[in-house]
Image (tube, rainbow, N blue to C red):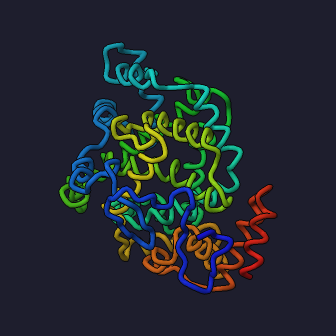
């Protein structure tokens, strides 16, 4: 049902008109109030599980060679080492990362970046309240965040600083024309994030040798593995497009959707995700099916999910009123079943305020959506 015509006094789950089931005979799966039809584009959990044992072999080997100190800028080390030795792993890495596959369409990437910038006020809400908070419902991913301290630091200021660091990647990639071409600011920023992921992976895998609790790869997978990277990419790509459709009352124009996914296909490659596993490589149907497959595989909220979700929602402002407002926004975007699983507070006034807050951000769509919401207020 439409976000603006929904009766918020009743249990609510967002449903997008453009994503409704068009039955082709496949089994219908339900997860946290969302229904979807299983198809040949979906991936069984048994096929996803092996991806959890694969990290980023190229960057992992490079860190082993460079042995960076905690204060080192890995990208600068890579450039220096490549300049010193053209046969080094660093030189090979830069050559590979700077190779542009035939499928890359720079005009489409630029259009995808412009789409993100144009829709940033709404996209930022989706990224924080749906992609990030909802993503904490996957304990195997949340465990990495908790063990590394990323987004789970005790001080809200530290959490916000890390959120801004994530935002820096988006700005570097999208704010300037050509930013993602090899050697440019967005490209360098993506390589730095890739190196950060490898450092976290290396630290967690080695902590048993330094007296800490050994990371259980058989149970949890390699930290920041290929499945984790695929679903994270979907959080920034498909999930943003779906959230924008929910808030705006209609989908982003098809050509802009295509451009936005193409942008993230290229960013995914720069971040170390194998292209044959990249969910943005073949349009919205594959992206949607991949997200649904991983949701079935990983989304099983536990006590850690609840703790981290609440911690993040309190980070911008620590007051109970601010937490309730943000929690109400998250419930509108992810639905009540997942909101209940994350133990988010339920408040009818809070839900109504959150809906009006979204409505105010909708620009030219607002008059039509206003009438829908007014009928339910």
Residue 146 visible somewhere in the drawing: yes
Instruction: Give 366 or 225, whichever is nearer the viewer.
Output: 366
Residue reaching furthest top?
Answer: 86
Above/below status of 12 relative to 245: below
User: What's the residue at 45%, 21% (across, down)?
Assistant: 102
Above/below status of 18 relative to 332: above
**Residue 333 percent across, percent down from the top left:** 57, 67
User: What's the residue at 35%, 14% (across, down)?
Assistant: 85
Quadrant location, the N terminus: bottom right
Quadrant location, the C terminus: bottom right
**Residue 120 percent across, percent down from the top left:** 68, 50
Residue 162 visible somewhere in the drawing: no
Above/below status of 364 relative to 355: above
**Residue 139 percent across, percent down from the top left:** 35, 66
**Residue 70 percent across, percent down from the top left:** 41, 44
Instruction: Give 204 or 312, whichever is nearer the viewer.
Output: 312
Q: Quadrant of residue 160?
A: bottom right
Q: Quadrant of residue 115?
A: top right
Q: Is residue 11 left or right of residue 110?
A: left
Instruction: Give 232 or 308, whichever is nearer the viewer.
Output: 232
User: What's the residue at 67%, 38% (across, down)?
Assistant: 114
Instruction: Give 334 or 150, whichever is nearer the viewer.
Output: 334
How many numbered markers are drawn?
0
User: What's the residue at 38%, 60% (across, down)?
Assistant: 37
């Amino acid at each position: 049902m439409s976000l603006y015509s929904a009766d918020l006094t009743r249990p609510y789950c967002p449903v997008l008109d453009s994503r409704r089931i068009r039955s082709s005979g496949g089994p219908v799966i339900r997860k946290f109030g969302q229904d979807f039809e299983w198809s040949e584009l979906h991936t069984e959990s048994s096929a996803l599980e092996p991806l959890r044992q694969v990290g980023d072999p190229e960057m992992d080997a490079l860190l082993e060679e460079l042995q960076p100190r905690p204060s080192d800028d890995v990208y600068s080390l890579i450039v220096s080492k490549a300049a010193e030795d053209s046969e080094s792993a660093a030189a090979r890495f830069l050559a590979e990362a700077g190779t542009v596959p035939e499928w890359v369409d720079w005009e489409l990437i630029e259009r995808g970046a412009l789409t993100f910038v144009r829709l940033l006020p709404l996209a930022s809400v989706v990224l924080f309240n749906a992609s990030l908070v909802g993503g904490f419902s996957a304990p195997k991913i949340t465990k990495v965040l908790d063990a590394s301290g990323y987004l789970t630091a005790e001080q809200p200021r530290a959490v916000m600083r890390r959120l801004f660091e994530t935002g820096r990647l988006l700005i570097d990639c999208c704010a300037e024309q050509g930013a993602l071409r090899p050697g440019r600011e967005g490209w360098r920023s993506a390589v730095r994030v890739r190196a950060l992921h490898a450092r976290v992976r290396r630290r967690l895998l080695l902590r048993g040798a330094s007296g800490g609790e050994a990371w259980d790869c058989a149970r949890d997978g390699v930290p920041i593995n290929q499945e984790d990277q695929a679903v994270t990419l979907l959080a920034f790509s498909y999930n943003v497009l779906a959230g924008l459709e929910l808030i705006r009352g209609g989908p982003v124009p098809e050509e802009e959707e295509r451009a936005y996914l193409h942008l993230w296909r290229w960013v995914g490659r720069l971040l170390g995700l194998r292209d044959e596993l990249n969910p943005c490589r073949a349009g919205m149907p594959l992206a949607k099916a991949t997200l649904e497959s991983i949701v079935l595989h990983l989304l099983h909220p536990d006590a850690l999910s609840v703790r981290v979700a609440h911690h993040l929602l309190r980070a911008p402002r620590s007051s109970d009123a601010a937490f309730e407002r943000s929690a109400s926004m998250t419930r509108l975007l992810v639905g009540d079943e997942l909101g209940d699983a994350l133990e988010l507070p339920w408040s009818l006034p809070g839900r109504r305020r959150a809906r009006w807050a979204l409505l105010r951000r909708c620009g030219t769509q607002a008059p039509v959506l206003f009438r829908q919401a007014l009928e339910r207020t």
